[in-house]
Amino acid sequence: MIEEEPDTPSVPAYVISGPPGAGKTQLAAHLARSLRDQESSAGGLDLLIWVHASDSEQIVTVYAEAAERLDLVEARAEDRVTAAKAFRNWLSSTDRRWLVVLDDVREPAAATEWWPEGTTPGRGRVIVTTRHRGVGFSAAGRDPLSLELGVYEVDEALSYLRRRLADAGQSQLYRSSSALALIEALGCQPLALGLAAAHMLNQEVNTDVYLDRFRDYRNQLSDLLPLDLDGAAVNQHVKPALAASLNAIEIADDTGLVRDLVRLIALMDPTGHPSKLWLTPPVLAYFQMSWERRHSLRWIKRRRPVTDSDILRALQHLRTYALVSQDSPATPVRMHVLTSRAICEGIPADALAALATTAADALVSLWPERDESDQDLAALLRTNTVTLNQHADGYLWDSGVHPCLIRTSDSFHEMGLHQQAVEFDESLLYQAEQYLGGGHGDTVEARVRLATSYRDAGRRQDAAHLMTEALHLSERFLGPDHQHSMAARSALAILRMDAGQVEEAVLLSEQVLSDGVRVLGSDHPNTLAARSNLAASYHEAGRLGEALALREQVVGDYERMLGRDHPDTLVARNNLAASYHEAGRLGEALALREQVVGDYERMLGRDHPDTLVARNNLAASYHEAGRLGEALALREQVVGDYDAMFGTDHPNTLAARSNLAASYHEAGRLGEALALREQVVGDYDAMFGTDHPNTLAARSNLAASYHEAGRLGEALALREQVVGDYDAMFGTDHPSTLAARSNLAASYHEAGRLGEALALQEDVVADYEHIRGPHHPESLNARHALALAYKDDQQHGRARALAEQLLTEHQSVYGPDHHRTKRVRTLLTELGI
């Protein structure tokens, strides 16, 4: 049992050192279980983190995943190191009981960087296993307690073997005549001795028999294990013991499945995978086919199909010989990393393809339809997919990219893990180019997928560059009319819109629709999607009439082709409501959005992510219609729903919280709006970084709350900062930069700095009219703000002329009863007209 030094403020740290196969990992596992049992009266360990820490990157990865599971704000940071540091700091401050095991540390300096600096006394511990002597480590300025393992002394090895057999009630298996020769053959290696003892107990053979078998296995089973597992000592002593165990299991196996099962397990992440993975239809089918193929030359055939009980019995064989471990049937299955590597390296090349594909098919079949419904399972599947892809030697790319890899990428996106998505999608593109070539359709799709990840991570320029490259390559290798070319063109249009290049975005969207009609036909699903995307481009470009007409057509098309209750029809109806909303037809927008919410709840359920989006949109319509009480109640409900479904720090939750702050702001509850917006800015900053578009938008909203609360100095300082950030990121003429400059002019105006406000707003109006066109809603809003500035500066003539012009344009664009038209009439009344 580990005993801590009393009254020490630093984290108790223990280093177990020794050569490969000395039993370091087994001892660490025993100590971990002992600590867990020791604390059982008080509820047990709250957190156990096991890291295969042969390099610091592995520590960062596991720490970052732990931060994600704990819902730490920094878990959504731009890089995993930030999230990992957040978890390390959390360990230092939490009152929960925890244990971190850093197994097989190769770089002592890298490991000590990740030891917590302090913890509540009695709450946290660190155990390290390493081949280095413990004196090479230090924890928070204090040397850890060290235990150096080597091979056993001869007397220790004999004592261990005798005691192990006697404790199992099989002391007769110990023969003094052969025990000494056996432990010498095993090199007194603890791991080899443990395997030998398990073998003898399960086979009920004595040391004489096992010694003979061991000598035979050393030369006979090189096909199962690599020639050099992990150094000469392990190769000489541990490898034959592993081979002997595998051979004994196969002899005892009454299912015929053990060899395939152990190879499948070796392809998984050693830290654990779901045991039910091996009960999925793809694995059952593989086992059946494999069994029949092995017995195809015999007269006897399997008379019944492979069943779940066969597989569970095979798994029990592996547990009995300690080749795998599992705390309970509901917990993940683990395999020692040395065993895993040995078996993987011994898989014949002609078997690896089928095994890897089967494992990948199984992972896909086990994936939850919605990751948020079982986030722990989804995280486990992502980790195992990454490990499988590393072992698969390219076989997951034999017929193009395997769906398992795509599902993993989608999972990172769905859970808002944008930086992890970027890293994974970068690896997918690299592999696609390596295995498929630059002109393959899946390579083009991988490039589009990575560009989308860059966009979500706020790397808009990288996204646009990569998407342009994807389009050119697709047109070159696949042709301009290929579906991948049209998809890349459509995605590029969205990025052009993000960059404020509205005219180019509209032209691209029009081309995609034209190509879709010509190549696929008017009613093809891709053509319908292209029509919907063009409507969105028109909407963004301020061409509201065309957007509305096209969206009404899209709704009719979807209802005719797919039915009123199809998910795509519901999305189209929701988009139409947005156009009604923007056109000032609030009654129709409200009625349609209420209908859409009801349809989503009926078709998908109240807690489906699409239902939450629809409910959030309905709250926006309530807000715009002045029904602030209903908007507030609904937005508070949406925040709670997102929090329960995705966690506090998911991007969807943050967006919902930002919308709620807007409703607080509009309702005059400025204190609540300010507090919430300050929190949102901090969350976005930690999650995405200070330069992400979402962070800049949140900072702009916070400045608006400062402005409304009369904290003009803070509003001005923040808005000047936001303008500088947008200018540096997007350029002076980007729509977001123009909006930030207009907001800054409003703060100058409110602060009485009318000269600066007028000069800046005049520039903004000119830029909007140049970039967006004179009739775009944002150009009209900018001119209205300029008219107000003229009025307050006593330039009534200029204000009056601008307001009269605005009234004509508002009536043309929105109609006489739109709230923006009414706002201009109010200004004219104030000017005495």
Image (tube, helix red, strand yellow):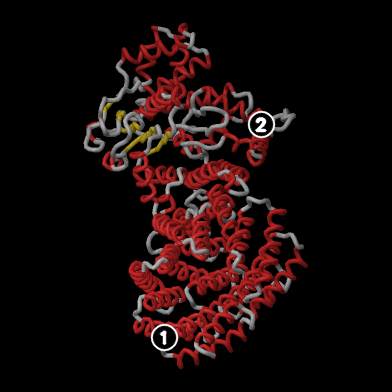
Residue 647 is situated, as x and y percent measured from the top left of the image, at 51, 48
Residue placed most toward the observer, 722 or 508: 722
Task: Give, as a three-letter code, the residue at label 2.
Answer: Asp
Residue placed most toward the observer, 410 or 154: 410
Q: Few, some or many C-alpha atoms within 10 Å of disc 1 (few <14, some 14-19, many ≥20)?
A: many
Residue 425 is situated, as x and y percent measured from the top left of the image, at 48, 57
Residue 673 is situated, as x and y percent measured from the top left of the image, at 46, 60
Asked if residue 450 can be seen in this view, the reply is: no
Disc 1: which residue? 762
Residue placed most toward the observer, 10 or 148: 10
The reply, left or right, for residue 98 in relation to residue 221 is left
Cα–Cα span, label 1 and label 2 = 74 Å
Residue placed most toward the observer, 328 or 90: 90
Give above or below for 137 relative to 390: above
Task: Give, as a three-letter code, the residue at label 1.
Answer: Glu
Number of numbered markers: 2
Asked if residue 72 can be seen in this view, the reply is: yes
At 52% from the left edge and 39% from the top edge, which residue is drawn?
348
The reply, left or right, for residue 45 in relation to residue 249 is left
SS category of the residue bearing label 2: helix
Q: Quadrant of the C terminus?
A: bottom right
Disc 2: which residue? 308
Q: Quadrant of residue 594?
A: bottom right
- First in sequence: mark 1 vs mark 2: 2
